[in-house]
Image: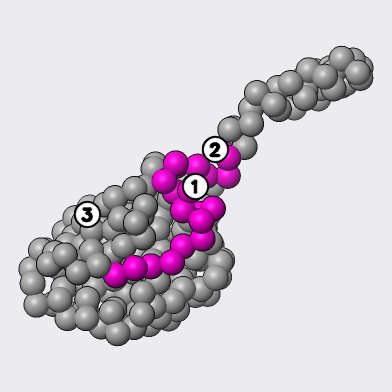
Amino acid sequence: MDKFEVHTGLVVPLDRSNVDTDAIIPKQFLKSIKRTGFGPNLFDEWRYLDRGEPGQDCSNRPLNPDFVLNQPRYAGASVLLTRKNFGCGSSREHAPWALQQYGFKAIIAPSYADIFFGNCFKNGLLPIVLPEIVIDRLFNEVAAFGGYQLTVDLPRQLVIEPNGTGHEFAIDPFRKQCLINGWDDIGLTLRHKDKIAEFEQRRLAQFPWLAKSAAATTIIKA
């Protein structure tokens, strides 16, 4: 996954609490076995006036003009500002995939559902927790100023307003390290690829018949 260090981006305000994962990416899109292509269907039932289906061309679908993501002033937003308990509901990993593939790099909220919160980190999306009083202030700022941007400085663990005001946020040190280095679960494993290769060589030297078993398994699968 991509590294995350410092990001400055346009903020879009989603002023709703308890946004569940079925709202983030509706259930019909979970049929896909791919990990790509979910961005156009982010918040599908709120974003469009018709029902979306997997594989559908979204370019000609009727948009809901009242939904915040469809407002021109928020086009290209990469920081999502929202309310408490974001990502509740079923534990679908497609939810952070859809948010990230739409273009979001960070989410700012007072609280998140636990499984969604963990899934974000595993996919390079930074969920930031700030106090509700700060969230309220940021909602007011976004409403008052067009083109409102925030800077997320992960190494310093700060959300920085345009006037320089910084808001500290907490993050698990291991998750922080993974984001800064761009390590997902596969990346963490590949850091030890030399040791894994050495182990396999020793294992085959000690149990040479396993090489034949592995070859047979490969032939059967083919």
Q: Residues within 10 Å of mark 1 (few under 14, many from 20)?
A: many
Extent of the magenta region? 167-188
- Residue at 28%, 74% (x, y): give it: 14
Q: Amino acid at mark 2?
A: Gly
Residue 36 is marked as none
Query: Gap between marks 2 and 1, in whole Å?
Result: 9 Å
Residue 214 as seen in the image, left or right of residue 39: right
Q: Secondary structure at mark 1?
A: helix
> Residue 66: horizontal and vertical position, in percent?
18, 76
Q: Quadrant of the N terminus?
A: top left
Sooner in the amino-acid sequence: mark 1 or mark 3: 3
From this view, report whether residue 222 is shown above or below residue 168: above
222 in the magenta segment: no
Disc 2 + disc 1, Cβ < 8 Å: yes
**Nearest-to-viewer mark from 2 and 1:** 1
From this view, report whether residue 32 is shown above or below residue 144: above
Residue hosting label 1 = 178
Q: Quadrant of the C terminus?
A: top right
Q: Secondary structure at mark 2?
A: helix
Q: In front: 119, or 33?
A: 119
Q: Amino acid at mark 3?
A: Thr
Disc 1 + disc 3, Cβ < 8 Å: no
Residue 8 is marked as 3
Residue 120 as seen in the image, left or right of residue 147: right
Q: Secondary structure at mark 3?
A: strand
- Residue at 30%, 85% (x, y): give it: 133
- Residue at 65%, 23% (x, y): give it: 194
Query: Gap between marks 1 and 3, in whole Å?
Result: 20 Å
From this view, report whether residue 121 is shown above or below residue 164: above
Residue 187 is marked as 2
Query: Gap between marks 3 and 2, in whole Å?
Result: 26 Å
Sooner in the amino-acid sequence: mark 2 or mark 1: 1
